Image (cartoon, helix red, strand yellow):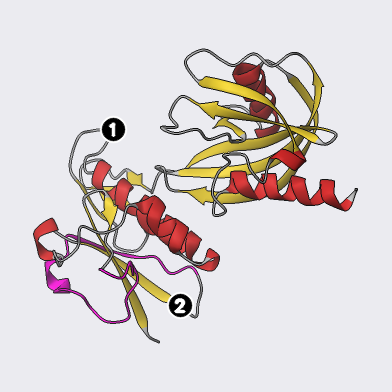
Amino acid sequence: MEIEYIYSSGHRVWSDLQGRWIFTQPCCDHNLALEEYDLTLLPQQQVKLLIMPEEVLPHETPGLQLRQLLSRSEESMFPLLSRAAQVTTWSRDHNFCPRCGDALRHHHQDLAKQCDGCGLTQYPRLSPCIITLVTRGEYCILAQGVRFTEPRFSTLAGFIEAGESAEDALAREVREEVGVEVSNIRYHCSQSWPFPHSLMLGFFADYVSGEIVPEPGEIVDARWFHYSELDEAPIPPPFTISRQLIDEFVKRCRAGD
């Protein structure tokens, strides 16, 4: 079976001048790799990630940023690129055992690292999150977070805390971020989100009560949007789960016209 290769260094997945990030032929000397991981997700597509020293990778291009790579990639390749980015971040940030402080070594079998000192095994970190579109008839709530550097209205999202169900986390996050209560929570889809290691669980929820009050320090603005406004509104790009929720909402509303 043909093997495909992905290269990374430091915090980024490497790409060439054409924006390609997965290759059927080696781009550098694999003997110089710092670490190698099997990223195979499908039996018919064997993929290896090679983490290289920065100076070994070709320098004719600085490479595209991860969001640029995601936006240019086919939808079917999103999970693999996300996986490569998340493993790269995990490998960079997890070099020492959190229990005893000894160096972590590449696990002989699993996609993991193991401590020679105490035997603790560390797997790539995964942080579950909820992301939801709150709706009321033909209207939905979108918000602009403080981290957006340009006008961008998106769905509400947040991390699931220890001991919470996804549904409990959703109700809490909506209450915290915009001050409203919701019910009839329905799961729609999920997406691996490599910023830096989230698993986004997408839901719809119905508005019940409350006035929108943006959370200070987190939300710059939040308001109701009629579905007919969304074609022109500054909403997330198509490759995001937020956009998938918005597009599904618009489709359902138009089907009911």
Q: Position of residue 248 (x, y in %)?
A: 73, 50
In the image, residue 2 sits, relative to residue 128, either above or below, namely below
Q: Amino acid at mark 2?
A: Gln
Q: Is residue 25 magenta?
A: yes
Q: Residue at x 24, y 46 (%)?
A: 92
Q: Position of residue 64 (x, y in %)?
A: 30, 57
Q: Is residue 144 left or right of residue 126?
A: right
In the image, residue 4 sits, relative to residue 150, either above or below, namely below
At label 2, counting other C-alpha atoms closer than 10 Å, the crowd grade (few under 14, some 14-19, many 20 or more) is: few
**Mark seen at residue 99:** 1
Q: Position of residue 244 (x, y in %)?
A: 65, 50
Relative depth, front residue between 257 and 65:
257
Q: Which residues are magenta?
A: 17-41
Identify the image quadrant of residue 83.
bottom left
In the image, residue 201 sits, relative to residue 223, either above or below, namely below
**Mark seen at residue 231:** none
Identify the image quadrant of residue 99.
top left
- Residue at the farthest front position: 232
The residue indicated by pointer 2 is 45
Q: Is residue 1 magenta?
A: no
Relative depth, front residue between 228 and 245:
228
